[in-house]
Image: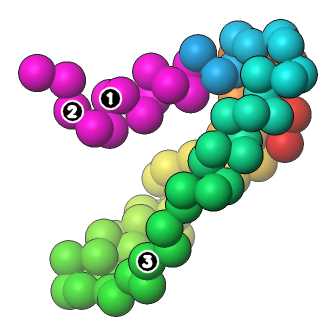
């Protein structure tokens, strides 16, 4: 059984390959009309994960944002952001 997260990634991969502007506009409208904004309350697990990430970066581990963006641009050169 495919998870919701995997379905989202599959959708993103298909969306990136679209070339028809009208199709993209229709999908954007559907998404915009159906987004439910939820307030996220930080729990201990989330706080600990963020603190762990910060500690890793301070220790010289991990990848900085600019490096991630650079790698994404190499992998998906037509992606605009």
Q: Label 1: which residue? A: 6
Earlier residue among tags 1 and 3: 1
Q: Is residue 2 magenta?
A: yes
Residue 64 seen in render: no
Asked which secondary structure carries label 3, the reply is: loop
Q: Looking at the image, do the residues carrying marks 1 and 2 touch, with CB atoms under 8 Å apart?
A: yes
Label number found at residue 38: 3
Q: Give whichever of 1, 31 is nearer the camera.
A: 31
Q: Give whichever of 62, 50 is nearer the camera.
A: 50
Type of colouring: rainbow
Quick one: which residue is furthest to the left in this view? Answer: 1
- Image quadrant in which you'd find residue 22: top right
Q: Is residue 34 magenta?
A: no
Earlier residue among tags 2 and 3: 2
Q: Looking at the image, do the residues carrying marks 1 and 3 touch, with CB atoms under 8 Å apart?
A: no
Residue 34 seen in render: yes
Q: Label 2: which residue? A: 3
Instruction: Give the vertical position of 25 relative to 77 (above or below).
Output: below
- Dot 2 crowding, Cα within 10 Å, few <14, some 14–19, many 20+: few
Highlighted magenta segment, given as a residue range: 1-13
Report the side of 31 relative to 4 (left or right).
right
Which percent across, then down, holds residue 43?
A: 24, 86
Label number found at residue 36: none
Q: Give whichever of 78, 28 is nearer the camera.
A: 28
Which percent across, then down, holds residue 3?
A: 21, 32
């Amino acid at each position: 059984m495919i998870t919701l997260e995997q379905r989202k990634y599959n959708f993103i991969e298909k969306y990136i390959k679209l070339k028809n502007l009208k199709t993209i506009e229709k999908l954007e409208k559907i998404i915009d009309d159906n987004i439910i904004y939820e307030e996220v309350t930080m729990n201990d697990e989330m706080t600990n994960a963020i603190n762990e990430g910060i500690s890793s970066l301070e220790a010289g581990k991990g990848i900085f944002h600019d490096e991630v963006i650079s790698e994404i641009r190499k992998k998906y050169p037509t992606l605009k952001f």
